[in-house]
Amino acid sequence: MRPLRFLPWAVRAVWAVLPFTVGPTLAAALDSRSDAVRTVSSTGLWAAWAVVVVATLVPHPVSLTVLRVAVPSAIAAVAWATVEGEMSVWAWALVVVVFGVAFLPETAVHFVNGPAYPNERRFLLRPPGPVLLGGLLPAWALAVGLPVSGLLLVAAGRGVLGAVVLVIGVPMAGVLSRALHGLSRRWVVFVPAGLVLHDGLAVADPVLFPKKVVESIGLAPVGTDSLDLTKNAVGLAVELVLKEKVPMVLTVPRNRAGEPGASARLLFSPTRPGAVLAEAARRGLPVT
């Protein structure tokens, strides 16, 4: 069975059993809390679990974002339970497994291709290096932590402080969640006419590179002077060499503001560079 067929079911299966494996650990950690806190916590955990169950059943970029926000939250919940004295090796094992499967590039391919046309194939791009190494964790922590903290403060009887946190945190969580979802909407997509770079962080609008102008596509050589659209992503880059320049509008222009740019050589960083090159070869593009 191909990994792309197996992995979505693995994600669903592991997430589905969390209430029966991780749940008792979290319940024990909440035992000493007030009835209101326990009720709010239990309701929130069950609601989050149900939302993710639905997300795993619907292949879509939104579902990928939901999954990749919720899975680290499960790890955070188990970590909190451990600090509270409810250490469970079994709970840790389950959340680590679901984290590993949810963040595999092959899992992402399944979700981002859900709404794609049958003759298209999307491959997610790696997150920008500064985001991955510095901004991703704080953004996730604020997007999840502020609304949760506000609700728990209200449940604990600290209504004024909780309301302030919610008033500030809910809009901020919305903005941060939208930014996190942007990472699930960055891809290179193969279409019958060629390939398209769909990356709002690098180009203002998706750019089509027709088959007839593609000279070669392959792993980027060291020291290449091609236009770097990887946003300093960590990992291998793919170099696309064209027979003629293709106009594009960069989000960070290299020329005068408002003027379209153009390049005959550019770099991008897919999460699965080998699969991208294999797909390019299958579609008749010259792979080097």
Image (cartoon, rainbow, N blue to C red):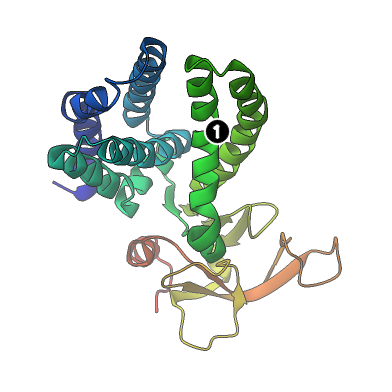
Residue occupying the point 44% across, 50% down = 122
**Disc 1 secondary structure class:** helix
Closer to the camera, 282 or 70? 70
What is the three-letter code of the residue carrying label 1?
A: Leu
**Within the image, what quadrant is residue 70 found in?**
top left
The location of residue 279, given as percent across then percent down, is 36, 60
The location of residue 69, given as percent across then percent down, is 43, 39
> Is 51 rendered above or below residue 115?
above
In this rendering, position of residue 89 left or right of residue 68: left
The C terminus lies in quadrant: bottom left
- The answer, for residue 256, to whether it is visible in the render is yes
In this rendering, position of residue 195 left or right of residue 96: right
User: What residue would you read off at disc 1?
Assistant: 146
The location of residue 130, given as percent across then percent down, is 56, 64
Count neighbours of disc 1 (C-alpha within 10 A) and say few if under 14, some if 14 to 19, many if 20 or more.
Answer: many
- The answer, for residue 113, to whether it is visible in the render is no
